[in-house]
């Protein structure tokens, strides 16, 4: 019986909608990239905390660490991967040298996940970002993969949401951790910025226009980078880079560093601003409505919270406010959750297994957080998009310890409910 698999909360029930593995898709050998390894089946009763290894579940359900599902997902990207006008999701699997892609049905449900190889690292991949890197009109994926090679892997989309690794490029480090994309040399294609782990700097890989990349260029004077965001910070029409840096408790390296684009993908030496305690992640958005991009920082121990750095329009930043967040905001994203025209914030909180939603008063100050349980464990990444087609932004997380993701549906007023 061909039925779509809805999101289910199997933390509360032993009924799992699953699919059987097709012939040739079991065992230790990974099937070729894009192999369709499942056919829909009727609901199956199980008594075990996890489905048998011969089943594949939707990645947005707990207990589905199977042949095609996520394995320790640590990053999430969204995009219309199959060009049907509906948003899809991709998760980077830290434990299996792969990604999983979930094709959205447009109503808040997803088709079963399909896994694609990504790199050959002992650990990784860690970061993932979506974009049309080869300029062919469909959305590809760039993945940061770690030891021993330290690569940026480009997974090219065939147009139907089937991905193949078509290039591997040096990240100038054995431990690339975070990746983001933007046209940082203003030549019309998407370049990639990679933040390397263990205080090993930040590099830029410029796109040659066809989804292949030049040798990495290092940003100068970067403390211990954790993440980065790309935005025009001084209103000159060129994209700049801001980096959240922390060595994990050393106040001397807890910075937000801003690198201004000079020309042709060359950047000035960074200027450092107070990043609070252990800045984990940051986002750029105009939260005070003055027309320039401010910086939003998710800070770590001991003062977990949202730090707002207001821009004077010339890329000089001053503290605009601090709002407490429940323990361990690992990732941050900005968007207008309640449709009032002001940019709000959401964070993924790993030690609390939750998402915090903070609504903007319209002036760059934020209301007290609303905390939503994600139904999984260790939410370490977050992204947004309209997954149910109702015109507002929903949230999706990657939950590392339960090998799954969570979808939080927005009611249009910034109230989110865990999809079942």
Image: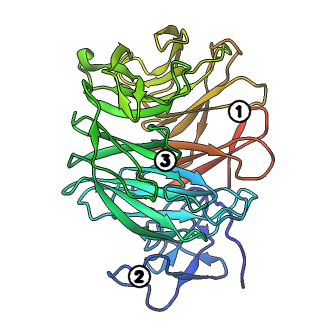
- Mark 3 or mark 2: whose residue is earlier in sequence: 2
Left or right side of 384 for 94: left
Name the residue at 54% across, 74% down: 46
Separation of residues labelled 1 and 2 (CA atoms) = 40 Å
Judged from the image, the secondary structure of the residue bearing numbered disc 3 is loop
Name the residue at 54% across, 55% down: 132
Instruction: Find disc 3 in the rendering and name its residue.
Output: 190
Residue 367: x and y in percent read 65, 17
Image quarter of residue 154: bottom left
Instruction: Find disc 1 in the rendering and name its residue.
Output: 337
Instruction: Find disc 2 in the rendering and name its residue.
Output: 31
- Mark 1 or mark 2: whose residue is earlier in sequence: 2
> Looking at the figure, which quarter contains the C terminus?
bottom right
Q: Relative to the observer, which residue lies in front, 355 or 76?
A: 76
Residue 336: x and y in percent read 70, 31
Residue 40: x and y in percent read 64, 81
Left or right side of 88 for 168: left
Separation of residues labelled 3 and 2 (CA atoms) = 30 Å
């Amino acid at each position: 019986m061909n039925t779509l698999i809805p999101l289910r909360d199997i933390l509360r029930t032993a009924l799992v909608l699953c699919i059987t593995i097709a012939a040739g898709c079991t065992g230790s050998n990974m099937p070729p990239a894009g192999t369709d390894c499942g056919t829909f089946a009727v609901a199956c009763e199980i008594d075990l905390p996890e489905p048998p290894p011969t089943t594949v579940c939707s990645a947005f359900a707990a207990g589905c660490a199977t042949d095609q599902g996520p394995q320790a997902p640590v990053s999430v990207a969204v995009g219309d991967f199959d060009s049907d006008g509906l948003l899809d999701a991709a998760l980077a699997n830290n434990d299996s040298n792969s990604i999983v892609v979930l094709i959205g049905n447009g109503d808040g449900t997803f088709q079963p996940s399909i896994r694609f190889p990504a790199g050959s690292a002992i650990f990784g991949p860690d970061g993932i970002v979506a974009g049309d890197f080869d300029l062919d009109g469909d959305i590809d994926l760039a993945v940061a993969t770690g030891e021993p090679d330290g690569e940026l892997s480009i997974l090219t989309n065939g147009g139907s949401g089937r991905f193949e690794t078509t290039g591997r490029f040096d990240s100038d480090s054995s431990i690339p951790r975070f990746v983001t994309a933007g046209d940082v040399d203003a030549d019309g294609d998407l370049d990639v910025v990679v933040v390397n782990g263990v205080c090993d700097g930040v590099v830029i890989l410029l796109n040659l226009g066809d989804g292949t990349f030049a040798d990495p260029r290092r940003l100068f004077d970067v403390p211990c980078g954790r993440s980065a965001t790309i935005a025009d910070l001084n209103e000159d029409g060129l994209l700049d880079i801001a980096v959240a840096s922390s060595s994990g408790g050393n106040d001397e390296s807890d910075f937000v560093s801003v690198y201004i684009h000079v020309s042709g993908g060359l950047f000035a030496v960074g200027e450092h601003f107070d990043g609070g305690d252990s800045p984990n992640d940051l986002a750029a958005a105009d939260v005070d409505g003055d027309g320039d991009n401010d910086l939003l920082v998710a800070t770590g121990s001991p003062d977990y919270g949202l730090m707002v750095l207001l821009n004077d329009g010339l890329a000089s930043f001053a503290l605009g406010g601090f709002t407490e967040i429940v323990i361990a905001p690992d990732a941050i994203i900005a968007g207008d959750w309640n449709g009032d025209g002001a940019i709000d914030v959401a964070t993924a909180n790993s030690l609390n297994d939750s998402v915090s939603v903070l609504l903007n008063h319209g002036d760059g100050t934020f209301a007290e957080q609303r905390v939503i349980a994600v139904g999984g464990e260790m939410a370490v990444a977050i992204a947004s998009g309209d997954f149910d087609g109702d015109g507002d932004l929903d949230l999706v997380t990657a939950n590392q310890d339960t090998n799954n993701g969570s979808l939080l549906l927005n009611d249009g007023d910034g109230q989110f409910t865990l999809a079942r």
